[in-house]
Image (cartoon, helix red, strand yellow):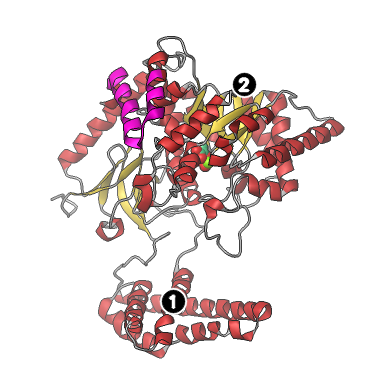
Amino acid sequence: MRAGGGFERRLKGVPVSPGIAVGVLRVEARGCPSPIVRSILPTEMESEWARFESALARTEEELHSLKARVEHLSGANEAAIFDAHLLFLRDRTVLSRLRKEMPKRMQNIDSVYYAVVQNFMEVMRHVDDPYLRSRVVDIEDVLQRVLKNMAPSETAPLCGDCTEPCVLAAYDLTPSDTADLDPRKVQGFVTEAGSAVSHTAILARSLGMPAVVGVPNLLIDSRVGCKCILDGYSGCLILNPSEETEQHYRELQAEKERAYSALVDMKDLPAETTDGRRIRLAANVEFAHEYTAIQRSGAEGVGLFRTEFFLLGGGSLPDEEAQYLHYRKLVESCNPQEVIFRTLDSGGDKLPFEVLEEKEDNPFLGWRGIRVSLSRVEIFKEQLRAVLRASAHGKVGIMFPMVSGITEVKDVNALLDECRAELRERGQAYDENMRVGIMIEVPSAAMMADVLARHVDFFSIGTNDLTQYTIAVDRVNFRVASMFRPTHPGVIRLMHQTIAAGKPTAVCGEMGGDINLVPLLVGLGVAELSVGAHLLPVVRYAIRHLNYKECRAMAEEALQAEDSYTIRNLSSDMARRCYPDLFR
Ligand code: PEP
Ligand code: MG
């Protein structure tokens, strides 16, 4: 047992961002389907009731305005359902049960209200009357509204009030929650939900913040305020670590840092196989301030600049001038290396472009990527002109996300031409030879690669989405995370078909940073890998220990394989043979 109390306990999850974080555990309810239970003092009782009363009042207002809107759009009959909601909101049975339970339990009121309503729904599910049974969904609806109105503001940065280094535990985090974390306060985070290819995990890696996802029962097993260590290498959260465990982690951290700086020392060596095949090794960037890390890693430019975090992260959309200045800064600092800007890719699990009144049922198949840009042409053209103008200050490429076919490519090319003409008219400079490419992340685009190749200069394969859309596995749903396999033969064949179209082809999805799969990508004939800055030294080392001819033969075999395990093993066996030291 530790001096501070409590035995050491280990919770296991999936490591998604390497590193070791040490701090006190901070538990946040954001994203959690049920409220976190917390004990309260008798002195807090009054403020808990006040919080509940104001949530009821806010919910009442919302229900009245929803009723009015539905009445206006669809008629009084359809709107009557909200009368039932309003009645349930002030239901005497529920409220008197809550009054009895609060002094008995002495817990935060949202958790007690949740328990009381859950009991009520359980009773309703067993009544004989089918009409009453069917009302359970309405009760659930009211419950969620009240809970939402009791929750702290969804926009305040998480752990903003922390006074000591902490490890954040949450049910789930959105990419915008993650982007707002202050690394001086939050040393790492751990979630119950989540997946390795979610944008939350991608951002953790670019922030250099250790992260673990998919820890079952995390919020039940966590002890708020206890000391903990988060191991982003093995995916372990250690609560109340013993003195020996702490010592072990201090040594592990020092050893990892030593090994990493040895790789960084080789940053100026070319990413070239032993038989002379040169691969361009570029960085994925989410925030312009990452440039120091990019330089340290020896990147040959930026292969994917995810502009959505800059465009949508600040509350209001930056105009053309603000974008131009921002892009220009990055282009100048990378000069003479190329920076490839990917135009806005909102939607999916990322921030919506507009706060839609209704959430989309299938956001990844909905209003996302190029679809948004092409339906907001004036805003899209501001981004195109800003990138074109930045191209006058260095080497720039532009590419478009979530392209599904030729019409979108022709549309964006026509808009680019319009923007070039407008800039000429304004007398503003741009590079006539700026490369134009598309991301290959929708299977239809991969199948049509030979046709699309006639209209663009390059392809960049987004394996995160290509995998998601090819196997129909939601990339952020942890229930199907084990099915998310970029080495699925369907995905590999689509990649092969894309490369066979003959355009310079990069891979910028997370697959490119997996050292087990680098031999396969090299063998498939990928010309460029673009990966998170911290992975660059590792991937360079891997490439320098591979033989291109052997990789090609292995990729040929992989293209004949029947399942994802065989393909992964073929590549991983070669990786372990050629650079065993990276697996220690
Ligand atoms: C991808 O889909 O692989 C990709 C690089 O884009 P994003 O992860 O931003 O969707
Ligand atoms: Mg994508």
Q: Earlier in the sequence, mark 1 or mark 2?
A: 1
Picture mark count: 2
Q: Where is residue 318 in the image (x, y as percent from the top left)?
A: 67, 45
Q: Which amino acid does label 2 sit on?
A: Asn
Q: Mark 2 points at which residue?
A: 335
Element type where label 1 sits in the image:
helix
Report the quarter where the C terminus lies. Answer: top left
Element type where label 2 sits in the image:
loop
Q: Where is residue 467 in the image (x, y as percent from the top left)?
A: 46, 41
Residue 565: quadrant of the picture: top left
Whether 577 is among the magenta residues is yes
Q: Are the two marked residues, 1 and 2, in contact with CB atoms closer than 8 angstroms? A: no
Residue occupying the far right of the picture: 425
Whether 265 is among the magenta residues is no
Q: Position of residue 452 (x, y in %)?
A: 64, 33
78 to the left or right of 434: left
Magenta-colored span: 553-580
| Residue ID at (26%, 49%) | 227
Q: Position of residue 434 (x, y in %)?
A: 69, 26
Nearest to the observer: residue 293 or residue 368:
368
Nearest to the observer: residue 372 or residue 520:
520
| Residue ID at (59%, 49%) | 368
Q: Is residue 275 above or below residue 186?
A: above
Mark number, residue 137: 1
For marks 1 and 2, give the CA distance: 58 Å
Q: Nearer the viewer, mark 1 or mark 2?
A: 1
Let me know if residue 418 appears in the view. Answer: yes
Let me know if residue 519 appears in the view. Answer: no
Residue 383: quadrant of the picture: top right
| Residue ID at (56%, 76%) | 62
